[in-house]
Amino acid sequence: MGSQWTLQPMIAGPGGLTGSDLGTRLRCALSQLQDEGCGPVIFIGSDTPDLPNTAIKYALDTVVEDPDKAVLNPADDGGYVLLGLPANAPLTVFDDVKWSHEDTLLTQTKALEQAGFSVMQGDVFCDVDEFSDLVALRDRLPSHVCPRIGRWLREMVGTGSIII
């Protein structure tokens, strides 16, 4: 990945992203990046701290090498944790997607295909939406990966100090 990519968090603010649902925010972010002349875009969920770099690299390599492909890494709950789009992706790739739904991956795949993309599906990963997901993250997270998150999870989740 090296120096050929830029991390651009999706944050709201003056001149920033607008909209209350994820689809509107993703569409707005893609539009802004395309207006800036950005190349391929990889959207990564912030609720998957153990997403490996290899998944990101695969998505980036795929959309750089073939502008007719998009990449999705499914979440185990029917959503997705990563979306890779080539530079030519139209904003319609977010049309009719059911957000926060068990069919999010399915409807996103359909929208991508309707926009003319072949969808490459990467490995399935777990995201964190519920307290049980935090417990599962704590149990699967090796101590050398995300050590601060791991320590926090062991302290807070282990003692029941988190109230959701």
Image (spheres, rainbow, N blue to C red):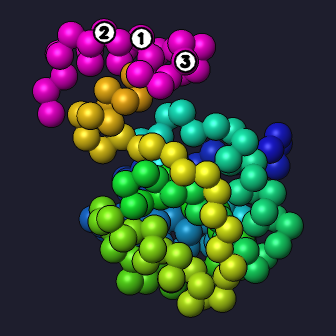
Front label number (3 vs 1): 3
Residue 137 higher or lower than 154, as above or below = below
Please state if 46 lies on the left or on the right of 133 as rendered: right
In front: label 3 or label 2: 3
Tell me residue 94's x, y (percent): 46, 77
Horizontally, residue 8 falls left or right of residue 48, namely: right
Relative to 34, is 158 above or below? Answer: above
- Note whether residue 36 is visible: no
Quarter of the figure with the C terminus: top left
Amino acid type, label 2:
Glu
Mark 2 highlights which residue? 155
Residues shaded magenta: 139-164
* Residue at the outermost right position: 65
Mark 3 to mark 2 CA distance (whole Å): 15 Å
Q: Secondary structure at mark 1?
A: helix
Image vertical order of residue 51 relative to residue 160, above or below: below
Cβ atoms under marks 2 and 1 closer than 8 Å: yes
Provide the secondary structure element on which disc 2 rests: helix
Residue 130 placement: quadrant: top left
Label 1 packing within 10 angstroms: few (<14), some (14-19), many (20+): few
Q: Amino acid at mark 1?
A: Arg
How crowded pointer 2 is (Cα within 10 Å; few <14, some 14-19, many 20+) is rated as some
Whether 162 is among the magenta residues is: yes
Q: What is the quadrant of residue 160 in the picture? A: top left
Please give the residue where the numbered disc 3 appears in the rendered image. 142
The tag earlier along the polypeptide, 3 or 2, is: 3
Residue at point 75%, 52% (across, down): 58
Q: Residue furthest left?
A: 163
Judge whether residue 148 can be spotted in this image. yes
Residue occupied by mark 1 = 151
**Tag 1 or tag 3, which sits nearer the N-term?**
3
